Image (cartoon, rainbow, N blue to C red):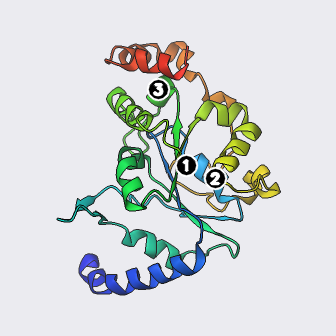
Amino acid sequence: MLKRIKKPFLPMIVSLGKRLEKKKFSDPPILIGGCARSGTTILTSVLSSHNDIFACPRELGLFSKLERKSDGQIIAVRIDRLYRSLLVNRIPPNAKRWLEKSPNNVRSIKEIDEYFSGRFKFIHIIRDGRDVVLSVHPTQKDRYWVEPQRWVEDVSKGLEYAQHPNVHQLKYEDLVMKPDKSIEELCDFLEIPFSPEIQNWQSNATVRRHNAYRNGLQPLQASSIEKWKQEKFKERVEEFLAYPGTSDLLARLGYE
């Protein structure tokens, strides 16, 4: 029923949203992607604190459904979700670009590049897979959130664009252990000032609630790193390392 109600209004939403986007944003959009449980949400919160950025508060999956026209043009079927977000959320008065994060964005970098004609910025966040696969699913407590196969596939897909000038790779562990350096490098990549607001991001973040935050927005915590070394996770880590490609990929990324 909801879909039937919304459908007639889609052209109007898209038209108004496009107009607002053109009026408000002069700089390239920012897309965040990476394997789930790798820090995409906390990175969104960090960047949402910057006055130059409007961060969509929810994952929109803009590039989760793509079509290609007969002339080769890429169609992002769910781009209307962006325009809805622009219309219903408060946009900071000085914002020059929008930001959207969906983990699966990492699987569509080629198409994102095409869609925006090369005018975009992409941040691929990577985390040690042995820690990634320890997260329990938020609604199904009897299973893990991410399986080894997904970590290998998502990280490998992102690494294909490691040399792309519009793609920045960030390790979750660096963000946690060297936040100032990591955030300053991010600002350089995005060509925005390393402002007092982003240096004090936890107080200024506009994205503060998410399903990934069980207890609300928390400081970056070193306790989230190398949990895999705990004896209670030994079986799960062995299962991860037994999956083809995990050890080679860990080594390539510089994890011990």
Q: Residue furthest right?
A: 196
Asked which secondary structure carries label 2, the reply is helix
Left/right placement of residue 205 relative to residue 82 reads right
The residue lying at 67 percent from left, 72 percent from top is 92
First-in-chain label (2 vs 1): 1
Height in image: 72 above or below 38?
below
The residue lying at 73 percent from left, 44 percent from top is 184
Give the quarter of the figure containing the C terminus. Answer: top right
**Residue 219 visible from this viewpoint:** no
Height in image: 16 above or below 252?
below
**Residue 239 visible from this viewpoint:** yes
Position in image of residue 86 (x %, y %): 51, 74
What separation in Å lies between label 2 and label 3 (alpha carbons)?
Answer: 27 Å
Which residue is the site of mark 1?
41
Which residue is the site of mark 3?
129
Height in image: 68 above or below 214?
below
Position in image of residue 16 (x %, y %): 45, 85
